Amino acid sequence: MAAYIFRRIILVIPTLLILSMLVFGIVRIIPGNVIDLMVTQDAVLQEMDRAAIEKALGIDQPIHVQYGRWLKDIITSGDLGKSLWRKTSVTEEIITRLPITFELGLMAIIIALVIAFPVGIWSAIRQDTMGDYIGRTFAIAGLAIPNFWIATLVMVFPALWWNWSPPVQYIRFGDDPGGNLAQFVIPAIIMGTSMSATTMRMIRTMMLEVMRQDYVRTAWAKGLKERVVITRHVLKNALIPVVTIIGFLIPVMVGGSVIMEQIFVLPGIGRLMVTATFDRDYPVIIGVAMFISVAILFVNLLVDVSYAYLDPRIQYR
């Protein structure tokens, strides 16, 4: 196991290196130019030479030179660079906004699991009944209906019908815990409901697969009660693969948070990414993308290791 973990950690290094090259190159070929945006918004810059502005921002050199300098700063000091617009540290921006995205994502994952586990288990136990059909319909609807559409309806129709809208001004948890949680409830429910659809389908599938095994049929033949068979024999083995859902939910949560933070005006990492993209703020875009990539790779590593501990049948060579 130790050797497997070591190999996985070593493999993360070239993965991140290749990913950083791709992100750096793709970001720089995005249509539009940060210089054009700055010149149109600042009269002082209009009188400056374009080459002088590029030199002042540090983007006058070839892309491969800029990449090498950026990579050197990360390795030597952990510095992700500075925003071209605000002149603030990208690392500090991420640290400041991370708790907001983390709170939203944690609430969404909890809601997703609270919905998915009972619905998925019940749907498998009562296969081809009305409850199963309702659960499967819910899962299909959750997969088919996009988050941004539901969020837009929540923002628009209550305001038109009842003159009410969700809070759109961020409240810090330390200032007002109740107001802070109330602000996250609606976007978390929207994200969690959508995320629960895939989770519920996987739980149902795993349950049905285990229930068809010989040892489960033997348990039924011995006359054990349904509760005993389900809890001791089916759930114990069916839910082990569900650990991999965590690795799946993290990138889904990140993508959903970008949309929810933008619609509900939450100043998290997702909103930072959107704002930086519109502003062509290259260091911020690259820094946030790399931070998210590292987080996803780390979570996937934890999931793989946890899976091996939970299921001794798995052997890593």
Image (cartoon, rainbow, N blue to C red):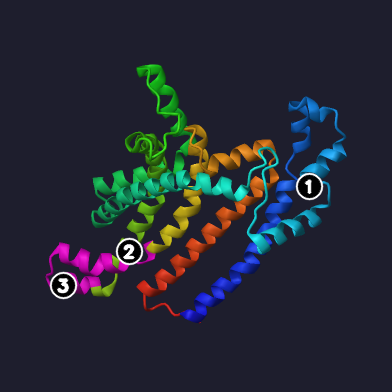
| Mark 1 crowd level (few <14, some 14–19, many ≥20, 10 Å Cα) | few
Q: Residue at x 51, y 78 (%)?
A: 4
- The total number of labels drawn is 3
Residue 51's quadrant in the figure?
A: top right
Q: Is residue 212 visible?
A: no
Front in this rendered view, residue 23 or 198: 23
Mark 3 or mark 1, which is nearer the start of the sequence? Answer: 1
Q: Is residue 154 visible?
A: yes
Q: Position of residue 47 (x, y in %)?
A: 85, 28
Q: Is residue 117 left or right of residue 8?
A: left
Eye-nearest disc, 1 or 3: 1
The amino acid at mark 3 is: Ala
Q: CA distance from mark 1 to mark 2?
A: 52 Å
Q: CA distance from mark 1 to mark 3?
A: 74 Å
Q: Position of residue 29 (x, y in %)?
A: 75, 46
Q: Which residue is mark 1?
A: 58
Q: Which residue is mark 2?
A: 239
Q: Residue at x 13, y 74 (%)?
A: 222
Q: Residue at x 25, y 46 (%)?
A: 131
- Chain part drawn in magenta: 216-242
Q: CA distance from mark 2 to mark 3?
A: 23 Å
Mark 3 or mark 2, which is nearer the start of the sequence? Answer: 3
Eye-nearest disc, 1 or 2: 1
Q: Which residue is mark 3?
A: 221
| Mark 3 crowd level (few <14, some 14–19, many ≥20, 10 Å Cα) | few
The amino acid at mark 2 is: Leu
